[in-house]
Image (cartoon, rainbow, N blue to C red):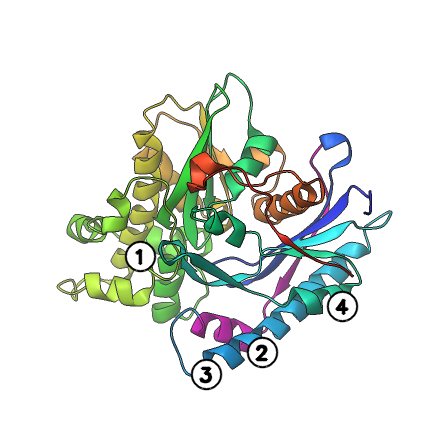
Amino acid sequence: MMTSSLYIGLMSGTSLDGVDGVLADFAGGAIRTLAAAFIPFPPALRAELMALQANGHNEIEREAIAANGLARAYAACVDALKAHAAGPVAAVAVHGQTVRHRPELGFTRQTNNPALLAELAGIDVIADFRSRDVAAGGQGAPLVPAFHAAAFGQPGTTRVVVNIGGIGNISVLHADGRVSGYDTGPGNVLLDGWIGRHRGEEYDADGAWGASGTLDPALLAALLNEPYFHLPAPKSTGRDLFHMEWLDARLAGFAELAAADVQATLMALTARTIADAILLEGVAVDAVYVCGGGAYNSALLRALAAALGGKVPVESTAALGIAPNRVEALAFAWLGYRFNARLPGNMPAVTGAAGPRILGALYPA
Protein backbone atom coordinates (compact mmCIF):
# COMPACT_ATOMS: atom_id res chain seq x y z
CA MET A 1 0.00 0.00 0.00
CA MET A 2 1.27 3.48 -0.87
CA THR A 3 2.85 5.24 2.07
CA SER A 4 2.48 8.81 0.76
CA SER A 5 0.97 11.24 3.25
CA LEU A 6 -0.66 13.29 0.46
CA TYR A 7 -4.41 13.00 -0.08
CA ILE A 8 -6.97 14.82 -2.19
CA GLY A 9 -10.39 15.38 -0.64
CA LEU A 10 -13.45 16.23 -2.74
CA MET A 11 -16.81 17.44 -1.53
CA SER A 12 -19.97 18.43 -3.38
CA GLY A 13 -22.65 19.33 -0.89
CA THR A 14 -26.34 20.06 -0.56
CA SER A 15 -25.97 23.51 -2.12
CA LEU A 16 -25.15 21.82 -5.47
CA ASP A 17 -22.87 24.61 -6.65
CA GLY A 18 -19.86 22.51 -7.61
CA VAL A 19 -16.84 20.58 -6.32
CA ASP A 20 -14.60 21.81 -3.53
CA GLY A 21 -11.24 20.07 -3.42
CA VAL A 22 -8.11 20.20 -1.30
CA LEU A 23 -4.67 18.68 -1.46
CA ALA A 24 -3.69 17.77 2.10
CA ASP A 25 -0.61 16.42 3.85
CA PHE A 26 -1.05 14.27 6.95
CA ALA A 27 2.64 13.55 7.58
CA GLY A 28 3.33 12.88 11.23
CA GLY A 29 -0.34 13.12 12.10
CA ALA A 30 -0.47 16.83 11.25
CA ILE A 31 -3.29 18.31 9.14
CA ARG A 32 -1.98 20.66 6.47
CA THR A 33 -3.72 22.07 3.42
CA LEU A 34 -1.33 22.50 0.50
CA ALA A 35 -3.75 23.67 -2.20
CA ALA A 36 -7.44 24.14 -2.89
CA ALA A 37 -9.59 24.21 -6.02
CA PHE A 38 -13.22 24.71 -6.96
CA ILE A 39 -14.90 23.37 -10.10
CA PRO A 40 -18.44 24.72 -10.72
CA PHE A 41 -21.00 22.28 -12.02
CA PRO A 42 -22.10 22.79 -15.63
CA PRO A 43 -25.68 24.14 -15.55
CA ALA A 44 -27.16 20.97 -17.08
CA LEU A 45 -25.44 18.71 -14.53
CA ARG A 46 -26.52 20.95 -11.65
CA ALA A 47 -30.11 20.92 -12.91
CA GLU A 48 -30.12 17.13 -13.22
CA LEU A 49 -28.59 16.60 -9.77
CA MET A 50 -31.23 18.94 -8.37
CA ALA A 51 -33.99 17.03 -10.17
CA LEU A 52 -32.69 13.71 -8.81
CA GLN A 53 -33.34 14.95 -5.27
CA ALA A 54 -37.00 13.96 -5.83
CA ASN A 55 -38.77 10.98 -7.35
CA GLY A 56 -38.93 11.11 -11.12
CA HIS A 57 -39.13 9.20 -14.39
CA ASN A 58 -36.30 6.85 -15.44
CA GLU A 59 -34.29 7.66 -12.32
CA ILE A 60 -31.85 4.73 -12.52
CA GLU A 61 -30.57 5.63 -15.99
CA ARG A 62 -30.58 9.37 -15.31
CA GLU A 63 -28.66 8.93 -12.08
CA ALA A 64 -26.03 6.74 -13.79
CA ILE A 65 -25.49 9.34 -16.51
CA ALA A 66 -25.32 12.14 -13.94
CA ALA A 67 -22.78 10.10 -11.94
CA ASN A 68 -20.54 9.96 -15.02
CA GLY A 69 -20.76 13.74 -15.41
CA LEU A 70 -20.05 14.14 -11.71
CA ALA A 71 -16.96 11.90 -11.95
CA ARG A 72 -15.64 14.08 -14.77
CA ALA A 73 -16.11 17.21 -12.65
CA TYR A 74 -14.29 15.46 -9.82
CA ALA A 75 -11.48 14.48 -12.20
CA ALA A 76 -11.10 18.10 -13.32
CA CYS A 77 -10.69 19.13 -9.68
CA VAL A 78 -8.12 16.37 -9.12
CA ASP A 79 -6.15 17.55 -12.15
CA ALA A 80 -6.09 21.10 -10.78
CA LEU A 81 -4.76 19.85 -7.44
CA LYS A 82 -2.24 17.28 -8.67
CA ALA A 83 -0.13 20.07 -10.12
CA HIS A 84 0.62 21.21 -6.56
CA ALA A 85 1.73 17.79 -5.28
CA ALA A 86 5.47 17.42 -4.71
CA GLY A 87 5.13 13.65 -4.70
CA PRO A 88 2.64 10.84 -5.35
CA VAL A 89 -0.91 11.21 -4.00
CA ALA A 90 -1.98 8.23 -1.88
CA ALA A 91 -5.67 8.51 -2.73
CA VAL A 92 -8.57 10.69 -3.72
CA ALA A 93 -11.28 10.64 -1.04
CA VAL A 94 -14.63 11.67 -2.46
CA HIS A 95 -17.99 12.14 -0.77
CA GLY A 96 -20.28 11.92 -3.81
CA GLN A 97 -23.52 13.84 -4.26
CA THR A 98 -26.30 12.94 -1.85
CA VAL A 99 -29.57 12.33 -3.67
CA ARG A 100 -31.38 10.41 -0.90
CA HIS A 101 -30.72 10.25 2.81
CA ARG A 102 -33.08 7.84 4.57
CA PRO A 103 -31.22 6.23 7.46
CA GLU A 104 -34.56 5.37 9.07
CA LEU A 105 -35.03 3.02 6.10
CA GLY A 106 -31.47 1.74 6.34
CA PHE A 107 -29.85 3.59 3.44
CA THR A 108 -28.19 6.74 2.26
CA ARG A 109 -27.24 7.29 -1.37
CA GLN A 110 -24.39 9.42 -2.65
CA THR A 111 -24.36 9.47 -6.46
CA ASN A 112 -20.88 8.88 -7.85
CA ASN A 113 -18.88 6.74 -10.27
CA PRO A 114 -15.66 6.16 -8.32
CA ALA A 115 -14.48 3.54 -10.81
CA LEU A 116 -14.59 6.12 -13.60
CA LEU A 117 -12.86 8.67 -11.38
CA ALA A 118 -10.05 6.18 -10.65
CA GLU A 119 -9.71 5.58 -14.38
CA LEU A 120 -9.60 9.29 -15.21
CA ALA A 121 -7.37 10.35 -12.31
CA GLY A 122 -4.97 7.43 -12.28
CA ILE A 123 -5.05 7.51 -8.46
CA ASP A 124 -6.71 5.21 -5.93
CA VAL A 125 -10.19 6.45 -5.06
CA ILE A 126 -11.88 5.98 -1.68
CA ALA A 127 -15.63 6.59 -1.75
CA ASP A 128 -18.92 5.61 -0.11
CA PHE A 129 -18.07 6.86 3.37
CA ARG A 130 -21.56 6.93 4.87
CA SER A 131 -23.08 3.51 4.19
CA ARG A 132 -20.98 1.52 6.68
CA ASP A 133 -22.13 3.74 9.54
CA VAL A 134 -25.74 3.26 8.42
CA ALA A 135 -25.18 -0.51 8.21
CA ALA A 136 -24.04 -0.36 11.83
CA GLY A 137 -27.32 1.26 12.81
CA GLY A 138 -26.11 4.87 12.57
CA GLN A 139 -27.40 7.92 10.77
CA GLY A 140 -24.39 8.03 8.43
CA ALA A 141 -24.24 11.75 9.28
CA PRO A 142 -22.80 14.00 10.32
CA LEU A 143 -19.34 12.51 9.77
CA VAL A 144 -17.38 15.74 10.16
CA PRO A 145 -17.40 15.96 14.00
CA ALA A 146 -14.52 13.45 14.23
CA PHE A 147 -12.46 15.65 11.92
CA HIS A 148 -13.55 18.81 13.71
CA ALA A 149 -12.27 17.31 16.96
CA ALA A 150 -8.93 16.41 15.36
CA ALA A 151 -8.48 19.78 13.64
CA PHE A 152 -10.09 22.24 16.06
CA GLY A 153 -10.34 20.60 19.47
CA GLN A 154 -8.42 22.06 22.39
CA PRO A 155 -8.35 20.43 25.84
CA GLY A 156 -9.91 22.58 28.52
CA THR A 157 -11.87 24.66 26.01
CA THR A 158 -15.44 24.09 24.82
CA ARG A 159 -15.80 25.02 21.19
CA VAL A 160 -18.65 24.57 18.76
CA VAL A 161 -17.94 24.12 15.06
CA VAL A 162 -20.97 24.90 12.91
CA ASN A 163 -21.09 23.82 9.30
CA ILE A 164 -23.65 25.83 7.33
CA GLY A 165 -23.98 24.29 3.91
CA GLY A 166 -27.35 23.43 2.44
CA ILE A 167 -28.04 21.78 5.80
CA GLY A 168 -26.65 23.01 9.11
CA ASN A 169 -24.86 20.80 11.61
CA ILE A 170 -22.96 21.32 14.84
CA SER A 171 -19.96 19.65 16.45
CA VAL A 172 -19.65 20.41 20.16
CA LEU A 173 -16.03 19.89 21.20
CA HIS A 174 -16.29 19.65 24.97
CA ALA A 175 -13.47 20.75 27.27
CA ASP A 176 -13.15 17.17 28.60
CA GLY A 177 -12.66 15.70 25.11
CA ARG A 178 -16.21 14.50 24.51
CA VAL A 179 -17.77 15.27 21.14
CA SER A 180 -21.47 15.62 20.37
CA GLY A 181 -23.33 16.89 17.36
CA TYR A 182 -26.03 16.42 14.76
CA ASP A 183 -27.81 18.05 11.83
CA THR A 184 -29.76 21.06 13.07
CA GLY A 185 -31.97 21.58 10.00
CA PRO A 186 -31.88 24.01 7.07
CA GLY A 187 -28.67 25.91 6.50
CA ASN A 188 -28.73 27.64 3.13
CA VAL A 189 -31.08 25.30 1.29
CA LEU A 190 -34.27 27.35 1.80
CA LEU A 191 -32.47 30.70 1.60
CA ASP A 192 -30.99 29.70 -1.76
CA GLY A 193 -34.26 28.32 -3.06
CA TRP A 194 -36.25 31.41 -2.10
CA ILE A 195 -33.86 33.94 -3.64
CA GLY A 196 -33.60 31.75 -6.73
CA ARG A 197 -37.37 31.79 -7.14
CA HIS A 198 -37.80 35.53 -6.59
CA ARG A 199 -34.59 37.11 -7.88
CA GLY A 200 -33.01 34.46 -10.10
CA GLU A 201 -29.85 34.41 -7.98
CA GLU A 202 -28.08 31.28 -6.73
CA TYR A 203 -27.56 32.62 -3.22
CA ASP A 204 -28.11 35.71 -1.07
CA ALA A 205 -24.67 37.36 -1.21
CA ASP A 206 -23.63 38.32 2.32
CA GLY A 207 -27.28 37.99 3.36
CA ALA A 208 -27.98 41.45 1.96
CA TRP A 209 -31.49 40.69 0.68
CA GLY A 210 -32.49 38.92 3.88
CA ALA A 211 -31.07 41.78 5.93
CA SER A 212 -33.28 44.21 3.97
CA GLY A 213 -36.43 42.43 5.14
CA THR A 214 -38.18 42.14 8.48
CA LEU A 215 -38.53 38.92 10.45
CA ASP A 216 -42.15 37.76 10.80
CA PRO A 217 -42.63 36.12 14.24
CA ALA A 218 -45.76 34.22 13.23
CA LEU A 219 -44.08 32.67 10.20
CA LEU A 220 -41.01 31.80 12.23
CA ALA A 221 -43.22 30.04 14.78
CA ALA A 222 -44.90 28.07 11.98
CA LEU A 223 -41.53 27.02 10.58
CA LEU A 224 -40.20 26.03 14.01
CA ASN A 225 -43.22 23.76 14.46
CA GLU A 226 -41.50 21.16 12.25
CA PRO A 227 -41.24 17.89 14.25
CA TYR A 228 -37.62 17.31 13.19
CA PHE A 229 -36.44 20.19 15.35
CA HIS A 230 -37.81 18.49 18.45
CA LEU A 231 -36.41 15.00 17.82
CA PRO A 232 -33.65 13.81 20.15
CA ALA A 233 -30.16 13.16 18.79
CA PRO A 234 -28.73 11.26 17.01
CA LYS A 235 -30.48 12.64 13.97
CA SER A 236 -29.67 13.80 10.45
CA THR A 237 -31.60 15.31 7.59
CA GLY A 238 -31.36 16.70 4.05
CA ARG A 239 -33.34 17.75 1.01
CA ASP A 240 -35.59 14.72 1.55
CA LEU A 241 -37.32 16.84 4.21
CA PHE A 242 -36.30 20.47 3.75
CA HIS A 243 -37.19 21.58 0.24
CA MET A 244 -39.28 24.28 -1.40
CA GLU A 245 -42.47 22.25 -1.20
CA TRP A 246 -41.93 22.03 2.59
CA LEU A 247 -41.62 25.80 2.69
CA ASP A 248 -44.61 26.41 0.43
CA ALA A 249 -46.84 24.29 2.69
CA ARG A 250 -45.90 26.46 5.68
CA LEU A 251 -46.35 29.72 3.78
CA ALA A 252 -50.08 29.09 3.47
CA GLY A 253 -51.73 32.01 5.21
CA PHE A 254 -48.72 34.28 4.72
CA ALA A 255 -49.35 35.26 1.11
CA GLU A 256 -49.24 38.98 1.93
CA LEU A 257 -45.69 38.84 3.28
CA ALA A 258 -43.05 40.58 1.17
CA ALA A 259 -40.52 38.18 -0.34
CA ALA A 260 -37.66 39.92 1.48
CA ASP A 261 -39.50 39.43 4.79
CA VAL A 262 -39.75 35.70 4.10
CA GLN A 263 -36.01 35.67 3.39
CA ALA A 264 -35.32 37.47 6.68
CA THR A 265 -37.45 34.90 8.50
CA LEU A 266 -35.67 31.99 6.80
CA MET A 267 -32.36 33.46 7.93
CA ALA A 268 -33.73 33.63 11.45
CA LEU A 269 -34.85 29.99 11.16
CA THR A 270 -31.32 28.85 10.31
CA ALA A 271 -29.79 30.94 13.11
CA ARG A 272 -32.40 29.97 15.67
CA THR A 273 -32.26 26.21 15.07
CA ILE A 274 -28.45 26.23 15.27
CA ALA A 275 -28.49 28.37 18.41
CA ASP A 276 -31.18 26.22 20.04
CA ALA A 277 -29.08 23.10 19.39
CA ILE A 278 -26.03 24.72 20.98
CA LEU A 279 -27.96 25.99 24.00
CA LEU A 280 -29.58 22.58 24.45
CA GLU A 281 -26.13 21.16 25.21
CA GLY A 282 -26.31 23.02 28.51
CA VAL A 283 -22.60 23.85 28.64
CA ALA A 284 -20.70 27.12 28.70
CA VAL A 285 -19.32 27.61 25.20
CA ASP A 286 -16.08 29.57 24.78
CA ALA A 287 -16.51 30.27 21.06
CA VAL A 288 -18.45 29.25 17.94
CA TYR A 289 -16.59 28.77 14.66
CA VAL A 290 -18.52 28.60 11.39
CA CYS A 291 -17.53 26.86 8.16
CA GLY A 292 -19.30 26.17 4.87
CA GLY A 293 -20.88 28.72 2.58
CA GLY A 294 -22.85 30.23 5.46
CA ALA A 295 -19.61 31.51 6.98
CA TYR A 296 -19.52 34.12 4.19
CA ASN A 297 -22.98 35.45 5.11
CA SER A 298 -22.23 38.16 7.67
CA ALA A 299 -25.94 38.85 8.26
CA LEU A 300 -26.47 35.19 9.16
CA LEU A 301 -23.48 35.21 11.52
CA ARG A 302 -24.89 38.30 13.26
CA ALA A 303 -28.25 36.57 13.56
CA LEU A 304 -26.59 33.50 15.06
CA ALA A 305 -24.66 35.61 17.57
CA ALA A 306 -27.89 37.37 18.56
CA ALA A 307 -29.76 34.05 18.90
CA LEU A 308 -27.01 32.93 21.29
CA GLY A 309 -27.70 35.97 23.44
CA GLY A 310 -24.74 38.01 22.23
CA LYS A 311 -22.50 36.40 24.84
CA VAL A 312 -20.54 33.93 22.68
CA PRO A 313 -17.98 34.97 20.03
CA VAL A 314 -19.03 33.81 16.55
CA GLU A 315 -16.41 33.80 13.78
CA SER A 316 -15.30 31.67 10.86
CA THR A 317 -12.89 28.74 11.06
CA ALA A 318 -10.34 30.98 9.34
CA ALA A 319 -9.58 32.19 12.88
CA LEU A 320 -8.34 28.63 13.58
CA GLY A 321 -6.28 28.45 10.40
CA ILE A 322 -8.61 26.70 7.94
CA ALA A 323 -10.68 28.65 5.42
CA PRO A 324 -14.39 27.86 5.86
CA ASN A 325 -14.84 26.71 2.25
CA ARG A 326 -12.09 24.10 2.68
CA VAL A 327 -13.17 22.37 5.85
CA GLU A 328 -15.49 19.71 4.42
CA ALA A 329 -13.20 18.69 1.57
CA LEU A 330 -10.34 18.51 4.06
CA ALA A 331 -12.53 16.37 6.33
CA PHE A 332 -12.98 13.79 3.58
CA ALA A 333 -9.27 13.83 2.74
CA TRP A 334 -8.75 13.04 6.44
CA LEU A 335 -11.33 10.25 6.29
CA GLY A 336 -9.46 8.81 3.30
CA TYR A 337 -6.25 8.93 5.33
CA ARG A 338 -8.05 7.15 8.18
CA PHE A 339 -9.31 4.47 5.77
CA ASN A 340 -5.81 3.70 4.51
CA ALA A 341 -4.55 3.61 8.10
CA ARG A 342 -7.43 1.21 8.94
CA LEU A 343 -8.68 3.57 11.61
CA PRO A 344 -12.36 4.32 12.32
CA GLY A 345 -13.83 7.52 10.89
CA ASN A 346 -17.21 7.71 12.61
CA MET A 347 -18.20 8.79 16.10
CA PRO A 348 -20.90 6.47 17.46
CA ALA A 349 -21.92 9.06 20.06
CA VAL A 350 -22.79 11.38 17.17
CA THR A 351 -24.26 9.05 14.54
CA GLY A 352 -25.75 6.39 16.80
CA ALA A 353 -23.82 3.54 15.15
CA ALA A 354 -23.20 0.36 17.14
CA GLY A 355 -19.49 1.18 17.37
CA PRO A 356 -16.46 2.67 15.61
CA ARG A 357 -16.21 1.65 11.96
CA ILE A 358 -13.68 2.07 9.17
CA LEU A 359 -15.54 4.13 6.56
CA GLY A 360 -15.16 3.95 2.80
CA ALA A 361 -14.58 1.57 -0.11
CA LEU A 362 -11.46 1.40 -2.27
CA TYR A 363 -11.34 1.67 -6.07
CA PRO A 364 -7.69 1.04 -7.02
CA ALA A 365 -6.14 3.05 -9.85
Kind of element beneath mark 4: helix
Residue at mark 1: 263
Residue, x 46% and y 51% (percent of image)? 134
Indicate the amino acid at tag 3: Asn
Q: Looking at the picture, how far across and down is residue 132, in whole percent?
A: 53, 50
> What distance separates the C-alpha of mark 1 from that of mark 3?
34 Å
Q: In screen coordinates, is 301 left or right of 325?
A: left
Of tags 4 and 1, which is closer to the observer? 4
- Mark 1 or 2 closer to N-term? 2
- What crowding class fits label 1: few (fewer than 14 Cα within 10 Å), some (14-19), or many (20 or more)? many
Drawn side of residue 288 relative to residue 338, left or right = left
Q: How far apart are marks 3 and 2 (CA)?
A: 11 Å
Question: Quick check: 291 above or below 59?
Answer: above
Distance from disc 3 to disc 4, alpha carbons, whole Å, reads 27 Å
Q: What residue type is labelled 1?
A: Gln
Could you say where residue 30 lies in the image, as x and y percent from the top left? Answer: 71, 32
**Disc 1 + disc 3, Cβ < 8 Å:** no
First reached walking from the N terminus: tag 2 or tag 4: 2
Q: What stretch is highlighted in magenta?
A: 30-52
- Find residue 259 and report its image quarter: bottom left
User: Residue at 66% of width from left, 41% of height from top?
Assistant: 338
Task: Inspect the magenta stretch and tell me whether residue 100 lies in it.
Answer: no
Residue that mark 2 sits on: 65
Looking at the rendered structure, the secondary structure element under dot 2 is helix
Q: Is residue 15 visible?
A: no
Which residue has dot 3 on it?
58
User: Looking at the picture, does residue 85 appear above or below residue 350?
Assistant: below
Q: Are marks 4 and 1 in contact (CB under 8 Å)?
A: no
The residue wearing badge 4 is 119
Q: Which of marks 3 and 2 is nearer the N terminus?
A: 3
Residue type at mark 2 is Ile
Whole-Å distance between the Cαs marked 4 and 1? 44 Å
